[in-house]
Image (cartoon, rainbow, N blue to C red):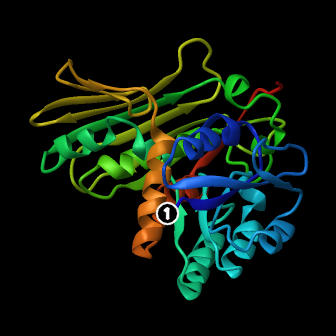
């Protein structure tokens, strides 16, 4: 039987990704939507999670899509009610919140999934396999996109806790930490804050790589035209280029694979497997790198930003 699922916060990411993934999955059925301002046809709609949890005791999974600053309370209530929980990235406002949710889920015996959708891009698994055992001599991450295109009018991303350019940048970190054969650590960072914002609009981050050459990341949220989501890796055995956020893989300039977006389908397939196994998947490494960049990064004030 499909797993009854509630989707909380019906915004752009819910409509563009979560709802189609649930509708096309044999493992889930959307039974509830929770939003103060939107409704989903075919599901029972609620304005608060408490009412939904009470009215639908057979809804087993709660998938949370609201901004991270307010996500903890929703997740905690769902876990306390014995429901499995999926957390849209980034999983929380702070690492301490995330660790507490992990503890709560373990104590309650429910599955908790800290999702990193970019890890499920079509070519990421192949990139990880190719890099295994190779001597890495350098990594360059270039993640540049247009905030006005992807987050039109969303002021929360510029408020403290909104992460700014690290909202997309954490996707790059989720891929990096998935494909690298060894751990890396933030060594230095320059964070560019618009004069009227609490979060950065661009960043340059350097990592210490005990296993080999330098790892550098450039993030920019003002790129117009074609968007850039690339990870280039040089090794002693050849060069790898992962493009389009992980959808396209080339080795030594030769295309190896390219496929359309199926990231969220992969997330829900993984969630079904976790529930079946009575397990959780709670890797916080990408968020730890972001926290480290904020902790040791040098702040640089730049021109004010307006939508």
Q: Position of residue 72 (x, y in %)?
A: 72, 68
Answer yes or no: is residue 10 visible. Answer: yes
User: As drawn, which residue projects farthest toward the bottom?
Assistant: 107
Counting other residues with Cα less than 10 Å from the Cα at mark 1, is it few (<14), some (14-19), or many (20 or more)?
some
Q: Is residue 242 above or below residue 96?
A: above
Identify which residue, 256 or 274, lies in the foreground. 274
Identify which residue, 59 or 130, lies in the foreground. 59
Q: Position of residue 304 (x, y in %)?
A: 81, 28
Q: Residue at x 47, y 69 (%)?
A: 275
The residue tagged 1 is 284
Q: Is residue 51 left or right of residue 165?
A: right
The image quadrant of residue 4 is bottom right
User: As drawn, which residue projects farthest toward the left?
Assistant: 237
The image quadrant of residue 131 is top left
User: From the image, which quarter does the C terminus lie in?
Assistant: top right
Answer yes or no: is residue 205 visible. Answer: no
């Amino acid at each position: 039987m499909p797993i009854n699922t509630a989707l909380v916060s019906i915004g752009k990411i819910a409509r563009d990704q979560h709802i189609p993934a649930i509708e096309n999955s044999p493992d889930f059925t959307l039974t509830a939507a929770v939003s103060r301002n939107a409704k989903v046809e075919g599901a029972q709609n609620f304005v608060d999670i408490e009412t939904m949890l009470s009215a639908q005791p057979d809804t087993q999974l709660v998938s949370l899509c609201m901004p991270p600053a307010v996500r903890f309370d929703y997740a905690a209530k769902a876990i306390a009610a014995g429901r499995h929980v999926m957390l849209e990235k980034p999983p929380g406002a702070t690492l301490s919140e995330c660790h507490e949710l992990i503890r709560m889920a373990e104590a309650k015996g429910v599955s908790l999934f800290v999702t990193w959708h970019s890890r499920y891009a079509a070519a990421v698994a192949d990139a990880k396999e190719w890099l295994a055992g190779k001597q890495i001599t350098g990594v360059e991450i270039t993640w540049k996109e247009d905030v006005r295109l992807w987050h039109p009018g969303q002021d929360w991303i510029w408020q403290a806790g909104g992460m700014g350019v690290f909202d997309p940048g954490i996707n790059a970190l989720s891929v990096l930490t998935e494909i690298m054969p060894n751990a890396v650590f933030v060594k230095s960072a320059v964070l560019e804050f618009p004069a009227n914002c609490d979060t950065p609009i661009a960043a340059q981050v350097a990592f210490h790589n005990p296993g080999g050459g330098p790892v550098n990341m450039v993030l920019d949220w003002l790129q117009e035209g074609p968007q850039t989501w690339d990870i280039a890796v040089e090794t002693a055995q050849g060069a790898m280029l992962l493009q389009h956020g992980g959808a396209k893989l080339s080795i030594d300039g030769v295309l190896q694979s390219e496929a359309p977006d199926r990231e969220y389908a992969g997330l829900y397939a993984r969630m079904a497997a976790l529930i079946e196994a009575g397990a959780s998947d709670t890797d916080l490494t990408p968020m730890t790198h972001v926290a480290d960049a904020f902790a040791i990064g040098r702040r640089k004030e730049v021109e004010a930003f307006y939508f």
